Image: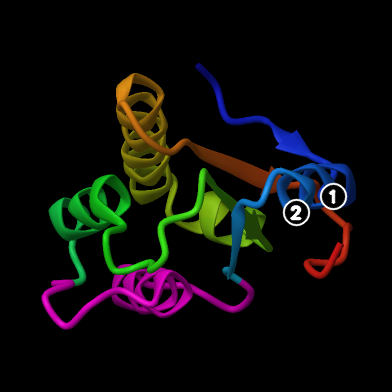
């Protein structure tokens, strides 16, 4: 599985039609890993136990139990990611791995589904 930039509007429309919860993670201006983790925690409305590290993000993306009622799926749209990816390629690769593992986890789960979408460069985050 690969995460490739995609247009946002069609994905949002499909997610809404299916009753999914949509989450937008805007990485505009993010330059450090702590800021990256704060953005993810805020976007996911992560509980207090969210520790702001790779393992905590991976755990949060595989749990999502605080979203009540649980939707049939989640669409996570990541926008303005290009600057962070260019400035911190090692962290970006780790983030991609965490996201891919979370998608794979939900793909094999009995309930729910998770899709992560990298919003195409130049496309507004609001879709």
What residue is shown with label 1?
13
**Magenta span has 31?**
yes
The 10 Å Cα crowd at callout 1, few under 14, some 14 to 19, many 20 or more, is few
In the rendered view, would you say 37 is above or below 92?
A: below
Q: Is residue 59 left or right of residue 26?
A: left
Alpha-carbon distance for marks 1 and 2? 5 Å
The image position of residue 25, as x and y in percent, is 56, 66
Residue 123 inside the magenta-drawn segment: no
- Name the residue nearer the viewer: 68 or 99: 68
Residue 16's label in the rendered image is 2
Q: Secondary structure at mark 2?
A: helix
| Quadrant hosting residue 18 | top right
Left or right: 124 with respect to 29? Answer: right
Residue at the image point whose x is 86% and y is 62% from the top: 127
Report the disc number at residue 79: none
Do the residues bearing badges 1 and 2 touch, measured as CB atoms within 8 Å?
yes
- Give whichever of 39, 84 is nearer the camera: 39
Colour scheme of the rendered structure: rainbow
Under circle 1, the secondary element is helix
Look at the image and give the residue range highlighted in magenta. Answer: 28-51
Residue at 21% in and 71% down: 52
At x 57%, y 69%, the residue is 27
Q: Residue at x 63, y 54 (%)?
A: 77
Residue 49, quarter of picture: bottom left
| Label 2: how many Cα within 10 Å (few below 14, some 14–19, many 20+) | few
């Amino acid at each position: 599985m690969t995460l490739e930039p995609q247009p946002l509007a069609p994905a949002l429309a499909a997610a809404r039609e299916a009753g999914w919860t949509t989450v937008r993670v805007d990485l505009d201006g993010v330059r450090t890993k702590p800021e990256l983790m704060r953005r993810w925690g805020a976007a996911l409305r992560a509980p207090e136990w969210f520790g702001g590290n790779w393992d905590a993000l991976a755990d949060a993306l595989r749990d999502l139990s605080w979203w009540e009622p649980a939707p049939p799926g989640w669409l996570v749209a990541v926008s303005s990611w290009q600057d962070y990816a260019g400035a911190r390629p090692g962290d970006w690769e780790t983030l991609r791995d965490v996201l891919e593992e979370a998608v794979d986890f939900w793909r094999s789960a009995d309930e729910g589904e998770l899709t992560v979408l990298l919003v195409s460069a130049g496309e507004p985050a609001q879709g």
